[in-house]
Amino acid sequence: MYFQKALKGINGIDQATAQHIVDNGLMSNWWRKAGTIKVADQKQLLNYANADLHLNHYNEPIPAGHLLSPYGGSYGSVSPFISTTAGAIQRDKDKGTNIFFDPFLTALRFATKQYRSTGYIFYCYLLTIGKAAIEMEQFSEEIRELHIYRDYLPYHSQGEIMAKIIIPSVQIEMAVEYNGPEAKAALKAKTIPVPTNRIINTTYLPPEKYSNIREVLS
């Protein structure tokens, strides 16, 4: 088992909402939409079919007859899964080199809606086991790992580590706010974007006292 550090960019939330997430955990869209959830429903939703809907049909309508179809909207708006990034590397065979996809930039683009507005990046860690374990809520899925998930995924460069149901508060280190246009200008000038706000979780339990910690790629 590994403690995998990850980033999650969320757009369109204010400081109070970010603080609430830090204090109470990062819920899946399903939990937020439903208000309360049932264990029996969790068992029905945590499977490969729903993982595929999350990964490949996120913005498409919920299939008719699906357990979540009464909520309406896209599957992503009620998904029990939570996308985070830890970075990715892909090979460019023609150029004989590897391409690095920075998790910070991936999270920043999601947080700021492609540098157009303000949003937060949440710094957290997830538990992984080096195998697919979609039915087990406590373990996150290493979607970016080609030795585990061999099917072609168009968004592999996002370096996804897929959590389930909720990321507990004690696993969230902090939330950092960025202004999109300012961040874009900083990157264009080849400087590191400066946060506009930072929320530190005083109840965070750092994983460094445990073994087998994996950092995000850098």
Image (spheres, rainbow, N blue to C red):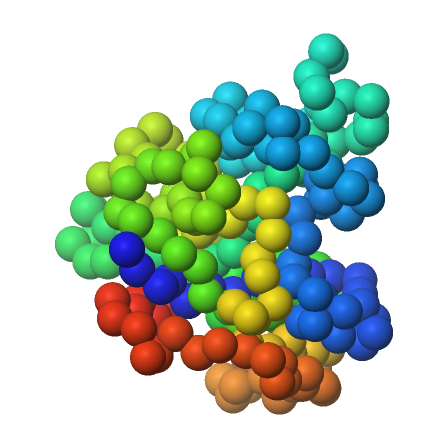
| Any part of residue 131 in sight | yes
Quadrant of the image containing the N terminus: bottom left
**Image-based side of 157 in relation to 17, left or right:** left
The image shows residue 164 at horizontal and vertical percentages of 54, 45
Above or below, 67 relative to 83: above
Which residue is at the front of the view, 64 or 156?
64
Q: Residue at x 51, y 49 (%)?
A: 163
Q: Residue at x 34, y 37 (%)?
A: 132
Quadrant of the image containing the C terminus: bottom left
Q: Residue at x 73, y 61 (%)?
A: 11
Q: Quadrant of residue 126?
A: bottom left
Q: Residue at x 30, y 69 (%)?
A: 213
Above or below, 218 relative to 200: above
Which residue is at the front of the view, 19 or 109?
19
Q: Quadrant of residue 17?
A: bottom right
State the count of labels.
Answer: 0
| Any part of residue 188 in sight | no
The image shows residue 162 at horizontal and vertical percentages of 48, 47
Residue that extends furthest to the top in the rendered view of this protein: 65
The image shows residue 111 at horizontal and vertical percentages of 66, 64
Q: Quadrant of residue 33?
A: top right
The image shows residue 206 at horizontal and vertical percentages of 44, 78
**Image-based side of 80 in relation to 206, left or right:** right
Which residue is at the front of the view, 1 or 81?
1
Residue that extends furthest to the left in the rendered view of this protein: 96
